[in-house]
Image (cartoon, grey):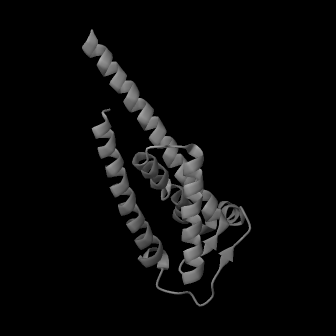
C-alpha cells in the first residue's frame, strides 16, 4: 500500500470512528430501545465484577435468549468497532493502546450513565466492552495481515 493509500485509509478510519461514536451516543443515551425513556426514579448500579454476568448465565432460561445475548454478546459486539476503527485510523497501532482506550471510552460511557441515570453503571459492562474493543483490534490485525499477504502474492505473480 502506498503512503497516499495508507493516508486515505486512516482518514476513512477517522470518519468511520466519528460516525460510530455518534451512533453509540444515540444508542446508549437517546434511543428508546431497551426502554430508555428518560431518567430512572430508582437508579441501579453494579460494582461487583462478574455479578451481572453470572446472573444472566444463571437465569438465562427465565430472562430469555435475546436478553442474555444482547447483554453478554451485545456488550462485546457494540464495542468491537472501537478497536477496529482506532487501529484503522492510527499510524501507531498497539494492543495495549487499544486496551487502554477501549477501557477509557467504556468507563466514560458508564460514568455518563451514572451521572445522567440513563442505563446502569456496571463494571461487567466495562469488562465486556473493553473485551469488545480488543477483539475489534484483533480482527483488524488479522485483516491487515491477510491483506498484506495477498498483496505479496500479487506482487510475486506480476514479477513472474
Residue furthest to the front: 3
Residue 110 visible in the picture: yes
> At x 59% / y 66%, what residue is drawn?
107
Q: Is residue 28 above or below residue 79?
A: below
The quarter in which the N terminus is drawn is top left
Q: Is residue 9 above or below residue 25?
A: above
Q: In the rendered picture of this protein, how many numbered marks are placed on residues? A: 0
The answer to whether residue 26 is left or right of residue 83 is: left
Q: Is residue 34 above or below residue 102?
A: below
* Nearer to the camera, 35 or 83: 83
Residue furthest to the top: 160
> At x 56% / y 49%, what residue is drawn?
97
> At x 43% / y 66%, what residue is drawn?
24
The answer to whether residue 153 is left or right of residue 81 is: left
**Percent position (x, y) of residue 62?**
62, 68
Residue 72 visible in the picture: no
Residue 126 falls in which quadrant of the image? bottom right
Residue 150 falls in which quadrant of the image? top left
The quarter in which the C terminus is drawn is top left
* Nearer to the camera, 160 or 113: 160
**Percent position (x, y) of residue 15?**
33, 57
> At x 48% / y 38%, what residue is drawn?
141
**Percent position (x, y) of residue 149?**
40, 25
Residue furthest to the right: 48
**Percent position (x, y) of residue 38?**
48, 86
Amino acid at each position: 500500500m502506498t503512503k497516499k493509500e495508507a493516508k486515505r485509509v486512516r482518514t476513512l478510519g477517522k470518519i468511520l470512528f466519528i460516525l460510530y461514536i455518534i451512533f453509540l451516543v444515540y444508542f446508549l443515551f437517546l434511543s428508546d430501545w431497551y426502554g430508555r425513556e428518560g431518567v430512572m426514579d430508582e437508579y441501579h448500579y453494579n460494582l461487583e465484577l462478574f455479578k451481572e454476568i453470572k446472573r444472566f448465565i444463571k437465569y438465562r432460561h427465565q430472562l430469555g435468549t435475546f436478553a442474555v445475548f444482547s447483554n453478554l454478546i451485545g456488550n462485546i459486539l457494540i464495542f468491537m468497532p472501537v478497536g477496529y476503527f482506532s487501529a484503522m485510523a492510527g499510524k501507531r497501532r498497539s494492543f495495549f493502546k487499544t486496551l487502554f482506550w477501549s477501557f477509557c471510552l467504556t468507563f466514560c460511557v458508564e460514568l455518563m450513565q451514572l451521572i445522567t441515570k440513563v442505563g446502569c453503571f456496571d463494571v461487567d459492562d466495562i469488562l465486556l466492552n473493553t473485551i469488545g474493543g480488543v477483539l475489534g483490534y484483533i480482527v483488524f490485525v488479522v485483516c491487515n495481515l491477510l491483506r498484506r499477504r495477498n498483496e505479496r502474492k500479487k506482487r510475486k505473480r506480476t514479477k513472474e
